[in-house]
Amino acid sequence: MGRPMNRMFRTDAALDRLNDERDHVAIQVNLAWDADPPDLVRLAALQRKLDGLRLKIHNYKPADA
C-alpha cells in the first residue's frame, strides 16, 4: 500500500555545516569573479576549496549509518 507520509525527517548537523560552508564559499567565488580585475590566484584557491567541500558532501556518511 505504500509508506506512511508522516515519517520524521532527521537532520544531520555535520552535513548541515558542510552544506553551509559550501554555500558560503560559492558566494565568495561569485563575488571574487565580480572584482575588477578578478584575483585569479584567490579564485583558484576558492574553487579548490569549493571542489573539496563538494567531494566531502558527496562522500559523507552519517555517524549512525
Image (tube, rainbow, N blue to C red):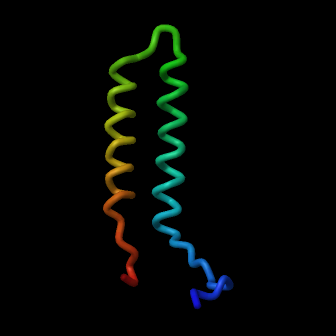
**Depth order, front residue of 65/35:** 65
* Outermost residue, right side: 6
* Outermost residue, front side: 1
Residue 58 lies, with reference to residue 64, above or below; the image says: above
Image quarter (top left, top right, bottom left or bottom right) of the C terminus = bottom left
Image quarter (top left, top right, bottom left or bottom right) of the N terminus = bottom right
The answer to whether residue 37 is left or right of residue 60 is: right
Figure disc tally: 0
Q: Position of residue 26 (x, y in %)?
A: 49, 38
Residue 3 lies, with reference to residue 49, above or below; the image says: below
**Depth order, front residue of 19/45:** 19
Residue 31 appears in which quarter of the rendering? top right
**Depth order, front residue of 15/4:** 4
The answer to whether residue 32 is left or right of residue 4 is: left
Q: Position of residue 28 (x, y in %)?
A: 51, 33
Residue at image coords 38%, 49% = 54
Residue at image coords 63%, 88% = 4
Residue at image coords 60%, 78% = 9
Q: Position of residue 29 (x, y in %)?
A: 47, 30
Residue 2 appears in which quarter of the rendering? bottom right
Residue at image coords 32%, 47% = 52
* Outermost residue, top side: 37
Residue 28 lies, with reference to residue 15, above or below; the image says: above
